[in-house]
Image (tube, helix red, strand yellow):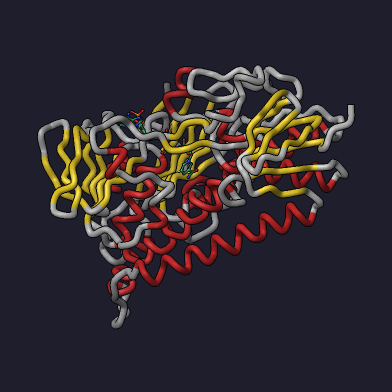
Amino acid sequence: MAFDYDLFVIGGGSGGVRAGRVAAQGGAKVGLAEEFRMGGTCVIRGCVPKKLMVFASGHGPAIEAAKAYGWDHAGGKFNWTKFQPMLHKELERLEGIYRKNLAGAGADIFDARATLKDAHTVELSTGETFTAKHILVATGGRPFLPDTPGAAELGITSNEVFNLDAFPERILIVGGGYIACEFACIFNGLGAHTAQWYRGAQILRGFDDEVRGFLAEHISERGVDLHVGLEVERMERRDGRIWVKGTDGREDVFDQVLFATGRVPNSGGLGLEEAGVKLGRKGEIVVDDYSQSSVPSIYAVGDVTDRINLTPVAIREGAAFVETVFNGNPTKPDHENVASAVFTQPEYGTVGLSEEEARAQEPIDVYCAAFRPMQKSFIGVDERVLFKLIVSQATQKVLGCHIVADGAGEMIQLAAVAVKMGATKEDFDRTVAVHPTMSEEIVLMKTPTRRD
Ligand code: NDP
């Protein structure tokens, strides 16, 4: 049977674009449909604009530090109306690059919503239908909003946060995950009065327990009004602002309430189940190690599969899919020891196992150093950094590395190479320190802080 396309990709985000581009470069006839903007969540309303806001917010504390270092004229206030157009101009530029690279590889781009009609057919919102030998679903995720009274009408999510008309003087961030912690630090750094309410006992559930406590302490010390064990009971519009009642009875008023209460796979209304594609409990497309769904011609990569929901992972999954399906070289995306960073202030970079995960697996040595870095202690800022290695007692392999410090995101990328290669504690110890740096501590920790 002749198909219109060798590959039709639904979703123009990181995973879909990578797969479409590489397949087209290899000679496949590729079509891709995107209903919103090319680049997907990462480029348009996720990692990229978030990181630009992280940069912007870092200048608040930096101005204070500059004054303490002897600069006379450091000062000023963050100007959202100046920053926001710059941000959107940059996003448009990046969107253009995504579009150009994909089209340049020879793929057809459709600015339309696509749904499945059957195992080999997609229908676009324009009314066109196309057949394809393979279909790749790369539709990502979308924010989840709890059914808290008033949340749907008055709350915003990370989808809206980059488009605010005015900079909020007072903002409440709901949640304790990556997005909540990052935006709490961003708005705090930009000068907003920032409260963060998290329902659980400690933020960043699933990460290393010691780091969670350390980070919560530092986020609070930097000025975020962080409360755990607290949820929004209801919210109402009052006098042009948002009145919020907490589950502990407290009442407060904010200009914005940002719900960062998780993301769910974007799999609804695509005709997936009708086409026979098996979905999991959260709506994720169930795939095998090669990203193939229960329908052999339909594959899925990225957040819609809810494996590891990170851009670089989606990109690897997209590339592995092309290698498997178009290059005759079955390739499983590697989900082992994926490093990541939470862009809080200070940042948290992590690779491998948490202390708790490692201990559940085998006897471990834990090496830990928490200290005041020279840059901060010089000006009397009482803030510590944390370097932590989790080491297998049996093999001496480094099972996990955790860093909380300004720039930890950059540091962990390099440490991740060593951990991925299976470096032992002795390999770290043999490496001569780079002095004076904070990160030299990672090769200078001689005695375990605890063993068990
Ligand atoms: P997370 O899953 O990290 O966090 C969701 C938070 O919302 C948790 O604190 C959770 O609480 C809370 N929550 C969930 N449901 C409710 C509810 N009904 N009421 C109140 N609170 C609720 O999701 P995020 O949205 O922060 O991020 C999504 C994913 O995006 C991340 O997992 C990550 O993979 C990716 N991401 C990565 C970033 C990076 O690499 N720097 C940055 C941003 C996102 P509880 O813990 O109790 O379940």
Is 242 placed left or right of 291 in the picture?
left
Left of 41 or right of it: where is 347? Answer: left
Q: Quadrant of the C terminus?
A: top left
Q: Is residue 202 above or below residue 340?
A: above
* Ligand 1 positioned in quadrant: top left
Going by the picture, which residue comes out furthest to the bottom? 72
Q: Residue at x 58, y 51 (%)?
A: 37
Instruction: Estimate the x, y position of residue 241 in percent, counting from the top left.
Output: 18, 52
Tell me how many marks there are: 0
Quadrant where the image shows the N terminus: top right
- Identity of the residue drawn at 26% across and 55% down: 382
Residue 392, visible in the rendered structure? yes
Q: Indicate the position of residue 271 as horizontal and vertical percent values.
A: 61, 26
Q: Nearer the viewer, residue 365 or 8?
A: 8
Q: Residue at x 78, y 56 (%)?
A: 104
Measured as percent of width and height from the top left, residue 386 is found at: 39, 45
